[in-house]
């Protein structure tokens, strides 16, 4: 692996991947040579959407963008960074609550792996209220979530009721 490449890992459950996530990655693309969107898998949790669907949706959203890779991982994010040759963890912040939570994780990651930096980007104001949790709740109740998802991601509401 080329150590001169600036590789960022963008970890999350992405259940589902929203326009807020998409915007963070789009805005980060000029900063990095490669962004790996890493879908964390926790065997103790069941995602609302199938892992395979989440991978496919993200690939569709970034179709043709050669700086994006989508992977699945288990375990610590910093270990995944080391496995992938990523020197950066990319995180989006919507609120001060997000900052408090993410700051603690970033500091622990830094203690464990000092060579990995966490980069925070603030969400655009119009994306601040959009969260995967709220989008799942809208789907669960039969609502239309198309305005909250990147182009190319189509969720069948009936499939998840």
Image: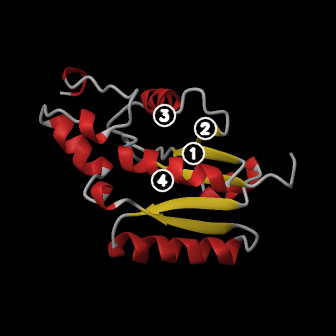
Q: Position of residue 147 (x, y in %)?
A: 25, 38
The residue drawn where x is 51% and y is 61% is 91
Where residue 81 sits, quadrant-wise, is bottom right
Pointer 1 and pointer 4: residues touching (CB < 8 Å)? no
* CA distance separating discs 1 and 3: 10 Å
Q: Earlier in the sequence, mark 2 or mark 3?
A: 3
Residue 141 horizontal side relative to residue 31, left or right: left
Residue 136 horizontal side relative to residue 104, left or right: left
- Mark linked to residue 71: 2
Where residue 97 sits, quadrant-wise, is bottom left
Report helix, strand or loop for mark 3.
helix
- Comparing 141 with 145, the one in front is 145
Pointer 2 and pointer 4: residues touching (CB < 8 Å)? no
- Mark linked to residue 38: 1
Q: Earlier in the sequence, mark 1 or mark 2?
A: 1
On-image quarter of the N terminus: top right
The residue drawn where x is 12% and y is 36% is 141
- Mark linked to residue 28: none
Where residue 86 sits, quadrant-wise, is bottom right
The residue drawn where x is 58% and y is 66% is 119
On-image quarter of the C terminus: top left
Q: Is residue 81 above or below residue 36?
A: below
Q: Earlier in the sequence, mark 4 or mark 3?
A: 4
- Mark linked to residue 24: 4
């Amino acid at each position: 692996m080329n150590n001169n490449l600036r590789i960022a890992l963008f970890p999350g459950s992405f259940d589902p991947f929203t326009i807020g996530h998409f915007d963070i990655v789009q805005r980060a693309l000029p900063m990095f040579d490669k962004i790996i969107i890493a879908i964390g898998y926790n065997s103790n949790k069941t995602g609302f959407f199938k892992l395979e669907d989440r991978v496919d949706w993200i690939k569709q959203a970034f179709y043709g963008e050669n700086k994006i890779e989508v992977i699945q991982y288990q375990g610590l994010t910093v270990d995944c960074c080391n496995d992938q040759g990523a020197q950066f963890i990319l995180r989006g912040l919507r609120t001060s609550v997000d900052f408090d939570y993410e700051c603690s994780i970033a500091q622990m990651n830094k203690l464990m792996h000092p060579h990995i930096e966490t980069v925070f980007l603030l969400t655009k104001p119009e994306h601040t209220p959009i969260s995967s949790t709220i989008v799942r709740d809208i789907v669960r109740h039969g609502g239309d979530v198309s305005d909250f998802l990147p182009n190319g991601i189509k969720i069948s509401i009936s499939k998840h009721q």
